[in-house]
Amino acid sequence: MLNKSLTVFVLGLGLALPQAWAQPGEDFTDLVEESVPAVVNVETIRFGSRPTQRQQAPDDPGEDIPDMFRRFFDIPFGEGGPGGGRPDRRGGGSGFIISEDGLIVTNHHVIDEADQVVVRLADRREFEAEVIGSDAQTDVAVLRIDADDLPTLDFGDSSDLRVGEWVIGIGSPFSFEQTVTAGIVSAKGRTQGRQQYVPFIQTDVAINRGNSGGPLIRTDGTVVGINSWILSSGGGNIGLSFSIPIEVARNSIDQLLEYGRVSRGYLGVGIEVITREKADALGLDRPAGALVNRVEPDSAAAEAGIEVGDVIVEFNGQPLDVFSELPPLVGMVRPGSEVPVVLSRWGEEITKQVTIKQLDEEQAMAQGSQGPDREPSNALGLAVESIDAETRQQLGDPDGGVVISGVESDAAYRAGVRRGQVILMINNQSIGGMADFRAIVEDLEPERSVALLLHSPNGSTTFVAYTPETDD
């Protein structure tokens, strides 16, 4: 009765009530019904090593002894025992169909290092997929299956997404296929780790392991992003999910289909954030733009006359509010193109015509992130990266492993885990690369101690053990 009286009172005063843009019981049933058939499950297999058949004489006394007792008789283990080969590793994620004749989009990290990729459709049909191409920098991969007349999803436009807008995600979290979750756009233009060429869309859509590669869909039924990663120390959703804007993904998809690889622009500058104090010192009206703190020799920036201390306030017609907006804009430019770059040089505005060069993978690896955001974590509370040849040599040529790029777990730090160390083993399982790391971490039991074999830059190796924190 109180609410009814209050409503009458407000209307009696002639005041307009706020418009209900979205009700808590928003109905996505039609949207889901149209979208789900085009979302697929992606399963990956990385073949393990096969043991050599044990040679044994007919009168071998150990012929009938089970493997579990062989250690007491100094008898070699058979297939499946210690030293008997490494089993296949399975992983997976999600994807969605973009053409009726079988083109599928997923994440690079879903299929990276896989020996076999199997796609399962919503109607339960399974196909072995061909990897057309993938790009680590944007975390996009394109697959093809031999099928026709498939349901598809259409690309939309994420540039006009508004913070607070409803979106849904569809995928296979923890292998629960065709799972639908909904939420709102929390922020735009987020950066992370080495993927500085992606201005991620942040949402509170529930995304978990297995959702990677699935579509982020707005209420008009178009795809505006590809779900890529979450930020979580425990490995589960805490409302911080990040998706690749579809414009960035589409640029990579088009190039992968046409060339089999992605070429992106390279300006050749190091940049940093502009604080209020820096803005005052540099003669800026407000703290916006990208402050140049390094110019690479023989780069596009050097040849155009860009100098250390310049502030890039506009690139190719796009004003910069924050410095992290620059790398994605540069990366989207085709190498060889000439673009205008507006600078503020100690209060004087200057425009330079810059011929953008091509970024190679070594440069992409070396640049890393210039921003405050860090690479997403995992159940270990550690951010890790694959090791390129140059870095491996600098670290003393460790055999396999992944390098730690950030320590977010207090327990790990107290145990002695540090950035720059290489993880060689987890719980006595060898780490050959990122695929091994992901597979092992996904199988870790919660609230159980883990033992890591670490290789330090000084060449020493040591075991550390700790219990990863969990989200309560």
Image: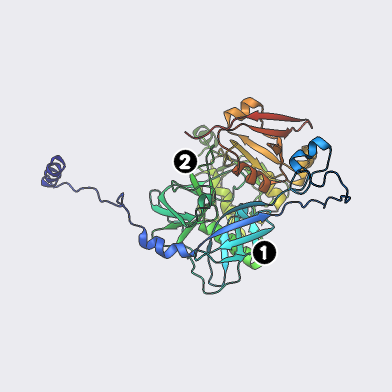
Q: Residue 260, labelled with which disc?
A: 1
* Viewer can see residue 231: yes
**293 and 249: which is toward the camera:** 249
Left or right of 265 on screen, residue 244: left
Q: Residue furthest bottom?
A: 149
Q: Is residue 148 above or below residue 160?
A: below
> As shown in the figure, which amino acid type bears the numbered disc 2?
Ile
Verify CB contact (< 8 Å) between mark 2 and mark 1.
no
Q: Position of residue 402 (x, y in %)?
A: 70, 41
Residue appearing at x 65%, y 62% in the figure:
131
Q: Which of the labelled discs sits on residue 238, or is there none? A: 2
Is residue 299 shown left or right of residue 369? right
Depth check, mark 2 against mark 1: the one in front is: 2
Q: How is the image coloured?
A: rainbow
At 49% from the left and 67% from the top, the residue drawn is 152
Q: Is residue 355 visible?
A: no
